[in-house]
């Protein structure tokens, strides 16, 4: 599994792109939490010189009603629990497939760079879920 922080960072960058621009992201944070956020601050977070805060995650996810970072953190533990369970693995595949199909259809409607990146990420999530279940099945073969 890829580094959780790298994946979370990629999700945050995608959320910023969906907001439209760095100014919009900064203004969203300023409106929600008060002043102190600027285009430069957001740019440094995207470049990795500053870390994302929990406030950033909550504000951007709530504004877009999309919760990829939250989902990532929840999946982190649920994947460990589902290591040997085919039913949980099948449920994960089903959920990931639904998310991928939704993202693919969004690309068809808008084709923005953010939508394309999200669709690719969702497809990778499906592949990861399939690989986990395949590994469980291979383990049961021997």
Image (cartoon, rainbow, N blue to C red):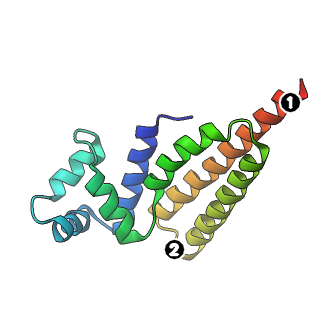
**Which is nearer the eye, 32 or 106?**
32
- In the image, what residue occupies the spot 20% across and 63% down? 26
Q: Position of residue 131 (x, y in %)?
A: 72, 39
Q: Residue at x 46, y 38 (%)?
A: 4
In percent of width and height, residue 99 lies at: 61, 62
Q: Please indicate whether residue 37 sits to the left or right of residue 104 in the image.
A: left
Label 2 crowd bin: few (<14), some (14–19), many (20+), radius 10 Å: few
Return the residue at label 2: 110
Q: Is residue 137 above or below residue 26?
A: above
- Callout 1: 10 Å neighbours few (<14), some, many (20+)? few
- The residue sitting at 74% across, 36% down in the picture is 84
Left or right: 141 as drawn, with respect to 12: right
Please state, as top left, top right, bottom left or bottom right, where the C terminus lies in the image: top right
Q: Which residue is mark 1?
A: 140
- Label 2, label 1: how many angstroms apart (C-alpha)? 43 Å
Q: Quadrant of the N terminus?
A: top right
Residue farthest to the bottom? 109
Residue 29: image x %, image y %? Answer: 21, 64
Front residue of 123/135: it is 135
Would residue 30 appear left or right of 141 to someone viewing this image? left
At 77% from the left and 49% from the top, the residue drawn is 87
When asked about the image quadrant of residue 109, the answer is bottom right
Whether 61 is drawn above or below 133: the answer is: below
């Amino acid at each position: 599994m890829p580094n959780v922080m790298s994946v979370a960072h990629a999700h945050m960058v995608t959320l910023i792109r969906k907001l439209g621009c760095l100014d919009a992201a900064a203004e969203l944070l300023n409106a929600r939490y008060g002043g102190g956020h600027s285009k430069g601050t957001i740019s440094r977070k995207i470049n990795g010189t500053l870390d994302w805060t929990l406030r950033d995650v909550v504000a951007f996810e709530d504004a877009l009603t999309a919760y990829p970072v939250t989902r990532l953190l929840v999946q982190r533990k649920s994947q460990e629990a589902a290591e040997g369970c085919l039913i949980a693995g099948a449920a994960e595949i089903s959920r990931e497939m639904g998310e991928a199909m939704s993202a693919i259809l969004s690309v068809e409607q808008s084709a923005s760079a953010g939508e394309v990146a999200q669709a690719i990420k969702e497809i990778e999530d499906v592949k990861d879920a399939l690989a986990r279940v395949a590994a469980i099945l291979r383990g049961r073969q021997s």
